Each structure stands twice: as structure tokens, then as C-alpha cells.
Image (cartoon, rainbow, N blue to C red):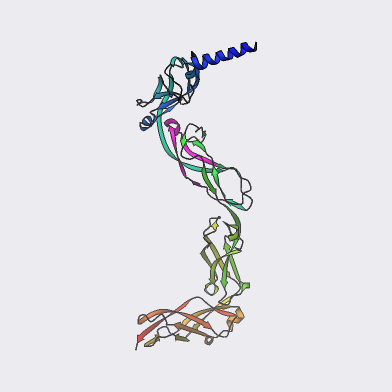
Amino acid sequence: MVLSVILAVVLWVYVVGVLNPDSSGLVRNLPVTFVGTDVLESRGLMITNGLEQTVTLNVNGKRDALLALSAETVSITIDVSSITQPGQYSNEYQISYNQPSGVSFSSLATTDRYPQTVSYTVVRQATRTIPVKGMMTGKVADGYQAGEFSFAPAAIEIRGEESLVNQIDYVLVTLDQKDMTETYSGDLPYTFIGFTGDQVDGSALEADTALVRTILPISQLKEVELTVNLIHGGGTTDQNVKCEIEPKTIMVSGASADLEPLKEISLGDIDLSKVLGSDTLSFHIPLAAELTNVSGSTEATVKVTIRGLTTATLEVDNIEFINVPEGYTPQKVTQTRQVQIRGEAEAVASVTQSQLRIVADLNNAVAATGTQTVPVKVYLDGRSDVGVVGDYNIVVSITRR
């Protein structure tokens, strides 16, 4: 029995290896390759519904040649370079053999093929550049604010079947984070959104990028008080000045390090000696470049009211000049000037005309000779409980010696 088995094996090896008899067999799952697609694309066309196809061949030939048949040695091709219009097509395919070394394919003959033809669809192709938009589905932590999305690239190019490409309005990047306190930066996927606002299946589309670099700045929020610097004058004290600022505060956003030292925002100075009774002033709200005014108010209104003080008007003729340049002579055209003072009633009543003097600084007033109006400063000597109110000027005549 052992001898019989040995003889059978030897005989089988001889027949298969030496005699190499004819045989037949099926070669399955051979992929179809379309050639000439570059020519098709140059005409604004592309293939859909048929790119992923395989065929099966029934082949006769020598046994060693049949054993060498596979997707690597058999090519199935369809030439589409002659197609000029979109439509449904069904073509026979070309079979070619890539003969490996040591094996002859000359004995091979295809006796049958499944399917006989390959069907596919040719459609018009389109390319569009569409914008990238962002949506946040999480939230920032309390006391923080999300800024505006930025993307790289800000738009992507898509290519595919014209009817599908023309459905796309934009691509949407979705960021899902919770309790954010720091700026987000990362690469995120996207979905296609149609003009109807619904998501569109874009798996058949080609895009020039699969991920979008997404940045969402996160900044801290802080409510900051608005203030003004009141310069006392004209007999005012803290007790008889009322100051109202609208808005009282603004909301500011920025980095924590920039916000921490910010305790208040000063709008500027108000000289109370120039406020008569009540005055309303407008101020621009200044803010450092690294901070953002979230409230949106760029100006503040300040109403200043002086209360509980008495005013009086005195005729002053004590006028003097200072800083008169050499070679020039000034003469008073204005001989007297009415000056208003303010303070507590008893203190105002005790002020005399002799305590007031008008000083004209001519340092910048002699650029031209002749009669001109110059600003002056009025001094009230010996009193701190009463002050001069308002701005004053006089007319002088300047001649050159």
C-alpha cells in the first residue's frame, strides 16, 4: 500500500510538472480599469455609477499558465477617451495578460466572460470653491466669551458631479467643547451643507483638503467702572459736586493677564472752574488695543452739577502783562472785565475787587502786531474758599518799538 501511494504521487508530479496538461478555470474579481479618463475630464466629464466593478473570466490553457492568472497578471480595461457627451454607456472590455517570467501565456484562451459588457454613467463635472463656516455645540466657562472662528484654508475646492457640486452652499466645521477657558486650535473634519440648510452626502465629491485648521479665540470678561478726574476750582469741594456717568460700567474682554490690573477706565479731566451750574459732556471711552469693548458703547456722557454755592460778578481793572517779548509794547484796549466768582454765600460776600487780578501772557500773542484778542488768567489772591469761574480774554494793541 505504501508503495502504491508513492507511485501515485510520483505519477501525479510527473503529469503536472512535466507533461503540464491543458485545463480550464475561472479567474474571479478582476477589477475594471477605465483609461482615457484624463481626456474625459478635459471635456468637463467624469464617470459615476460603475467605477468599482469586477469581472470573471473562464480561461482554457496550460495548467501552469492558469495557476499564474490573477488581478496582477490580467488587466481589464475600457477606453473612454472617445466619449464626448454625458449619458449611460455599456461597452465590452479589453483583456490583456501581463506574462510573468518563466510562464508562457500563449496557450490561454478566454472561453467566456461574466458580465459580457460593463455599464457606467458619464456625467458633467464641475469644480467650485466654497467657504468654510463654524459652529460651536459646546459652551465657554462662566465669565468667558468666544470670539469669531478663523480657518485655514478659509475656503475649499470641491470637484465632482455637476448636479451634486451645485447643491453645496458651504462646509461646516463643528467644535464640541465644554467649559472653555482657553483659545482652541486644531484640525477638524467638516460636513457639506446644501442651499436648503440640510446636510448633503459628499462622499462622492473630491476636496483639496480633508481637515480644516480651526481657531476659536476664548477671552475673559470683566465689568469695569468708568470714572472722570474732577479738577476742583471755582470754589468747589467734593460736597457740592454731583457727577453722573452713563453708562457707569462697560463689559471688557481680553486675556486674563491684561484684564487683571484693570480696575477702572478714566475718561479724562473735568475742570470744575469752567462748569457753570450744570454741564453735560461727552467722552470717548479709551481702551488698550489688546482689549475689546464687548458692550459696544464707544462714548460716555458725564453730567456735572454744582450745588449749594453762590456766584457774584465783580468789575476788575487790575490787568497786567507777562512775557512781553523785547521790542514790543502792549496797550490795554479792554480796560475792565467782569469776572464771576463762586463759593459759599458768606465767603463770596467778603471778596473785594482788589483781590482779583487779570494776567495776560503775551508769549504767543505777538506773532503779529496790531489789535488782537488774547486769553487771560484771573487770579483771586488770598482766598481758597472762593474761586473764579469761567474763561476770560481781553483785547490788546501790540506795537513794535
Residue that appears at 61% across and 46% down = 139
Q: Is residue 362 left or right of residue 216?
A: left
Secondary structure predominantly adopted by residues drawn in magenta? strand
Extreme residue in the right direction: 1
- Please give the count of numbered marks on the rendered protein: 0
Name of the residue lying farthest toward the front: 3
Q: Position of residue 368 (x, y in %)?
A: 35, 80
Where is the N terminus found, in terms of image quarters?
Answer: top right
Res 166 visible: no
Height in image: 218 above or below 289?
above
Q: Is 302 placed above or below 115 here? A: below
Q: Position of residue 177 (x, y in %)?
A: 61, 45
Q: x%, y% of residue 104?
A: 44, 20
Figure quadrant of the C terminus:
bottom left
Tell me, yes or no, if residue 281 can be seen here: yes
Q: Can you tell which quarter of the image residue 364 is in?
A: bottom left
Give the camera-side residue of 122 and 292.
Answer: 122
The stretch of residues the image draws in magenta is: 146-173
What is the quadrant of residue 341 in the picture? bottom right
Task: Tell me: residue 327, above or below residue 178.
Answer: below
Residue 344 horizontal/vertical position (percent): 61, 78
